[in-house]
Image (tube, grey):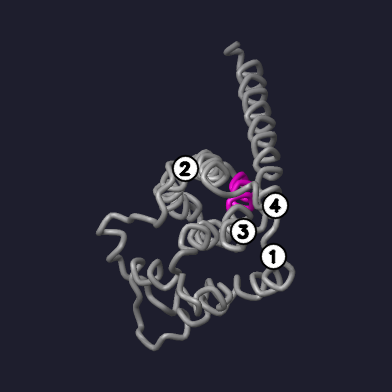
Amino acid sequence: MNPLERRQPLSDLLQDISDDPDPEVTVGEIVHRLGRRSFGALLFIFSAPNWLPLPPGSSTFLAAPLLLLAPQIAIGIRGPWLPRFIDERKIRRADLAGAFRKLIPTLQKIEKVSRPRLAFLFGPIGDRLIGLTVTLLSLVLLLPIFLGNMAPAAAIAAFGLGLIQRDGYFAVAGYVISAISVGLLVVGWNVAVAFIQHIAQVLGLA
């Protein structure tokens, strides 16, 4: 790993990407700048915006890259592979900088208190388990559930931070929030089924 990359916090790296004078940046350039931390950083970048005010359907758009990246973690690929049409896709730097500006302050606070710990949650088995869990959570993000994307997105963001910092506390938080996400999904499904059955009874269809 490049010594400079090891020292530079992710928040500083995102700020550098935002401040570059080139008006456009490709997804491949972002991945290259992130280096060995690409997987964790990309999980965070594509999940955290779900907590920001976004247009309808944004969670589905953000889940697509996650569904491409998470299985790669699950099968043990060391660096992210992206198809050329995604790798070469250009993004307006102003749009990217706007999103990063909202995320960087929180990230800076996290970096001050985070450190490598609970290392057994990572490695060949731990990383694959995180990848599998994030794959399943990403499928949930694709579903058009009102406010149903917030808990899965929070879990994925926690896993991303865990991979970046090798901080097991974030991995534990990711698993806990994942369990909560499953519980909320089950409750939401039962409520939806009960509502449909009630409407059917009112209309005399059942």
Amino acid identity at mark 4: Leu
Magenta residues, start to end: 147-156
- Measure the alpha-carbon separation of dots 2 and 4: 19 Å
> Is residue 173 shown left or right of residue 145?
right
Give the position of the C terminus as an image quadrant: top right
**Quick check: is 148 in the magenta stretch?**
yes
49 on left or right of 93: right
Q: Identify the residue position indicated by label 1 in the image.
A: 115
Q: Quadrant of residue 109?
A: bottom right
User: At 59% across and 49% down in the image, what residue appears?
Assistant: 122
Mark 1–mark 3 CB contact (< 8 Å): no
Cα distance, mark 2 to mark 1?
24 Å
Task: Say which of 196 and 44 sits in front.
Answer: 44
Q: Main secondary structure of the magenta part?
A: helix
Marked residue nearer the N-terminal end (2 or 1): 2
- Sequence-wise, the earlier of marks 3 and 2 is 2
On the question of residue 144 being in view, the answer is no
Mark nearer the N terminus (3 vs 4)? 4
Task: Report which quarter residue 113 is drawn in.
Answer: bottom right
| Residue 64 in picture, x, y percent from top left | 41, 50
Please, what secondary structure does the residue beneath circle 2 have?
helix
Report which residue position mark 2 lands on: 74
User: Label 4 crowding class (10 Å Cα cut-off): few <14, some 14-19, many 20+?
Assistant: some
Residue type indicated by callout 1: Arg
Looking at the image, the residue that sits furthest to the right is 113
Give the number of the disc on residue 195: none
Q: Are marks 3 and 2 in contact (CB under 8 Å)?
A: no
Q: Amino acid at mark 3?
A: Arg
Q: Residue furthest bottom?
A: 21
Q: Which residue is nearer to you in this view: 140 or 32?
A: 32
Local packing at callout 2 (Cα closer than 10 Å; few below 14, some 14-19, many 20+) is: many
